[in-house]
Image (tube, rainbow, N blue to C red):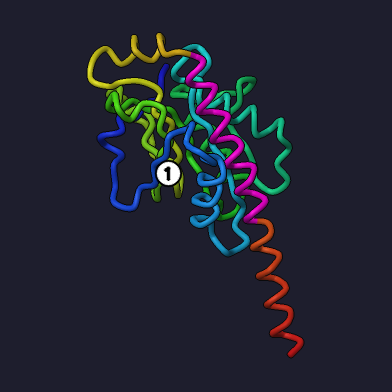
Amino acid sequence: MNLKQNIFDLHKQNEFRIAYDHDLADHQVALKISSMLPSTDQPIIVVCIGTDRSTGDSLGPLIGTKITELGLSHFYVYGTLDEPIHAVNLNEKTEEIYSRHHNPFIIGIDACLGRLKSVGHITIGKGPIKPGAGVNKELIPIGDMYITGIVNVSGFMEFFVLQNTRLNLVMKIANTISNGIFKAEALHSRKQEMNKLLINKDITN
């Protein structure tokens, strides 16, 4: 089953958008993600939604696999090619995340469909991701912020469009987002360390 959302439903004020092949796109993605993460000690959970049974829908698990292989030190990753998160197990996996992590900050990641001129763009925004909206599925929203990759054009036979999306494009978007998350974790870790140093300095003074 495909978990899609239509980019027309996602468009919000303050939403960040960049083409995957823009100069330093992964760095820009990292800066945006880092700026939206909490300054508290909340665990950061990356939930990558999708399935490799459909090319267009494989963006999420591809990202989950890539960032797992990169070796994140502080972020927790759910949803990979080996263990995808999709319509059938989304509720179960969401319950698992909340049982394992106290007060998590969740980054929801999914592929989506949009206008022709938007294909290849990455969007980042505040609030939950709404999987299934683009193909008329009622699934629970999840996340405190979302990252989406626009993999193809919406408006007609979405299931067919997703299944016939070029893997080359999906892989390139996945690479940019994965590198951005990896860099964002490093930025976030440095910020947290600086905050701790400042707190300790205030205490000692």
Measuring from the top left, give residue 118's x and y in whole percent: 33, 30
Q: Which residue is mark 1?
A: 124
User: Which contiguous range is marked in magenta?
Assistant: 167-188
Q: Nearer the viewer, residue 104 or 204?
A: 204
Is residue 171 one of those drawn in magenta?
yes
Q: Residues within 10 Å of mark 1 (few under 14, many from 20)?
A: many
Residue 44 colored in magenta in the image? no
Please indicate whether residue 80 sits to the left or right of residue 112 in the image.
right
Vertical placement of residue 143 versus 154, above or below: below
Quadrant where the C terminus sits is bottom right
The amino acid on which the numbered mark 1 sits, given as a three-letter code, is Ile
**Residue at position x 68%, y 56% from top?**
189
Residue positioned 49% across, 29% down in the render: 49
Report helix, strand or loop for mark 1.
Answer: strand
* Quadrant location of the N terminus in the rendered image: top left
Residue at 37 percent of width and 28 percent of height: 112
Q: Is residue 191 above or below residue 75?
A: below
Which residue in the rendered view is the most extreme toward the right?
Answer: 204
Image position of 84 with respect to 47: above or below = above
